[in-house]
Image (cartoon, rainbow, N blue to C red):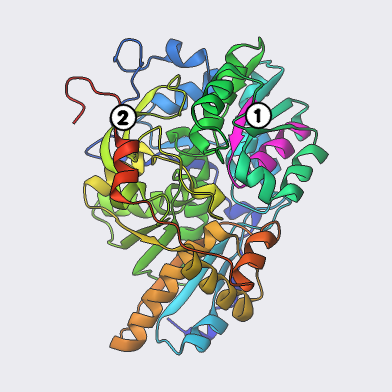
Amino acid sequence: MNENKIPYKIYLSEDEMPQYWYNVRADMTNKPAPLLNPATLQPMTQQDMEGVFCRELARQELDDTTAYIAIPEEIRSFYKMYRPSPLVRAYCLEEKLQTPAKIYYKFEGNNTSGSHKLNSAIAQAYYAKEQGLKGVTTETGAGQWGTALSMACAYLGLDCRVFMVKCSYEQKPFRREVMRTYGANVTPSPSDTTEIGRKILQQFPGTSGSLGCAISEAVETAVNHPGYRYVLGSVLSQVLLHQTVIGLETQTALKKYDIHPDIIIGCAGGGSNLGGLISPFVGEKLRGEADYRIIAVEPASCPSLTRGVFRYDFCDTGEICPMAKMYTLGNGFIPAANHAGGLRYHGMSAILSQLYHDGLMEARSVEQTSVFEAAEYFARCEGILPAPESSHAIRAAMDEAIKCRETGEEKTIVFGLTGTGYFDMVAYGQYNDGKMSDQIPTDTDLQKGFATIPNFPGNN
């Protein structure tokens, strides 16, 4: 490989953009366990799911055998407004760290939503429109998903109702206003607008909210309004499927310059960006074509992989959604109001949970002060202010590069830069003012969450 031929940014042409999403479940020997209907404890059927989800999205959720699913042309046309996204060589970061490692990042912040979330938002809105629906409901943590979905719905002429986790609603008013600019109705969660919201407020007065709470409110709103369906920004297999445009483009860009990564790193909340980035590479591992070290990085304040349990649990706090077998802290776990808003989910994608359980990837948790230290270091080197969520991956990538400096190993590291942090200045301000602290749940805190996991035969 000729180092001089590798540019700072590797761009693909429109013709090189993926025409298919990749379904990693097709290559998994141990498939993710099926979603369960909480009323019957039986696997969810297409009919069960269509009461909450769009018809085609329900079909994609249940399909664990089709390896490649065609991307509709209207979705590909929308993608072309901001895709393909660049794969960037972090030359300045490498020089600053004085590491022999080669560092690349896939940058997903080149759109108004500021993150990777638009990849699935347009797909889900498209299938809702195709079904003839009036609108969709959803939850959002840090606001990237809500922003992306509001953009997609505005483009397709759909109504969009967003329940935003209360602490993020208060910390990130500008993100909220972007959603409203695109026509979305935005409500802080938990709220008094739903039965479940009122119940949670009564049980946890003054709560800062959680994604599990917001999901419950969004689902309740969807099922109580004819012509609406619920859409989710992470966790579900259909979402990871849509996000594989990230990994497929990364794979193509690396092959273009004969680059062979040793380590692939992504931040992990519900799993959408991590799953989207790593799926094509995991497929190569599963087929015996290549091997990679894959690292999931999560906040120490919400450590579902590193401290959770692998069991069936409700996907929401109100216990009205299907149950998924995943690494979970318990649907009743409400994390501290930290600044990794998009990584505050109590569970993890069933796909990623199974891959982790089978030893196909690693996981580590990091404290938020360490994350913001890495974020500012990266910003001063690479000229991009990263989102707090993305900065978890940056922290791990820097740590691995420093290890290479200490050992002299010349490893190639690829990480996902999921979005920008320009709506996160309250968090950056708290860090710069020395007011940010690390909030890590105690074992007692975790036990309270575990106690909310449903207890039925075989769920251990």
Query: Which numbered marker is on residue 85?
Result: none
Q: Quadrant of the N terminus?
A: bottom left
281 and 269: which one is in front? 269
Name the magenta segment's main secondary structure: helix
- Secondary structure under the numbered disc 1 in the rendered image: helix
Q: Is residue 150 visible?
A: yes
Q: For the C terminus, give its image quadrant.
A: top left
Q: Nearer the viewer, residue 202 or 360?
A: 202
Residue placed most toward the observer, 5 or 418: 418
Which residue is disc 1 drawn over? 126
Q: Is residue 335 above or below residue 195?
A: below
Question: Which residue in the structure is indicated by mark 2?
Answer: 453
Give the residues in magenta: 137-154
Q: Position of residue 437 (x, y in %)?
A: 50, 64
* Quarter of the view holding residue 298: bottom left
- From this view, report whether residue 295 is shown above or below residue 222: below
